[in-house]
Amino acid sequence: MLDLTQLMTYSVSLLIAAIVPGPGMAALVARSVAGGAVSGSCLLLGLILGDLIYLSFAVFGLALIAEHFDPLFQLVRWGAALYLGYLAWRFWFADHQQIVVGRPAQKRELLSAAVSGLTITLGNPKTIAFYLALVPLAIDLQSVSLGSWGLVLVPLTVVVLVAVGAVFIGAAVRIRYLLSSARAQQYLFRGAATVMLGAALSMLVR
């Protein structure tokens, strides 16, 4: 059974990992600036879903199974790296987005945001290292039951990530007017593209 010390260690570690800038938060800020809080929230939903998938991998030992299917794992790794590279290209050459407050987001845009968030997380080396290398050090995975996973770890993970994501989304929405110029958006989008390209290259060289 998980004790309070393990849960606190896991929560603090996850909080720090989420706050440290990476491709996920870079995309979250860029999406929130361009599409507003609703679009950013959908991307955050995809990010969280990706985290929960890796959490499940760590808890149920699926990482060990992945080692026996190396060709499939390599295919997923290359696919995620290529997608991150594609997103980096899209952000780098993104056109100036006119900021229109109150414009309802289209369902296609929201779905695209959620899928992007999921793919970014699944291809993020930092996320992989956290759940498959650091989490086993913070939590005795042998003591995690199906109930403690579903009733404790999953809600705790969601709460921490929502709290951090909400801060990034709120900050991005508040500075939308400051980023209304073409030059400011170019700096933001190309910064996000650089972070994503770095993550993609990191996946390929590891």
Image (spheres, rainbow, N blue to C red):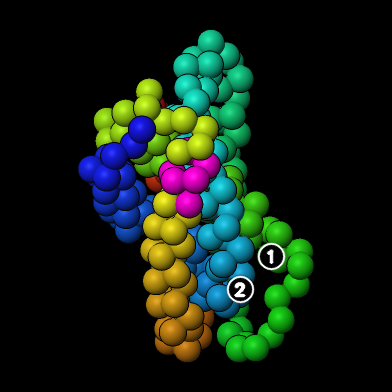
In the displayed structure, 89 sits above or below 167; it is above
In the displayed structure, 93 sits above or below 58; it is below
Is 75 on the left or on the right of 59, as rendered? right
Whether residue 133 is visible to the viewer of this picture, yes or no, is no
Q: Residue at x 49, y 45 (%)?
A: 151
The residue segment tinted magenta is: 149-155
Is 96 on the left or on the right of 1, as rendered? right
> In which quadrant is the C terminus drawn?
top left
Q: Amino acid at mark 2?
A: Val
Give the image quarter of residue 73. top right
Give the image quarter of residue 139. top left
Which residue position is annotated with label 1? 110
Cα distance in 3D space between marks 2 and 1: 8 Å
Name the magenta segment's main secondary structure. helix
| Secondary structure under the numbered disc 1 in the rendered image | helix
The disc placed on residue 153 is none
Could you say where residue 153 lies in the image, as x and y percent from the top left? 43, 44
> In which quadrant is the N terminus drawn?
top left
Circles 2 and 1, Cβ within 8 Å, touching? The answer is yes
The disc placed on residue 38 is 2
| Secondary structure under the numbered disc 2 in the rendered image | helix
Alpha-carbon neighbours of circle 1 within 10 Å: few (<14), some, or many (≥20)?
some
Q: Amino acid at mark 1?
A: Leu
- 128 is within the stretch colored magenta: no
In-front residue for pair 161/76: 161
Tally the numbered discs.
Answer: 2
User: Residue farthest to the top?
Assistant: 68
Q: Residue at x 46, y 30 (%)?
A: 145
- 154 is within the stretch colored magenta: yes
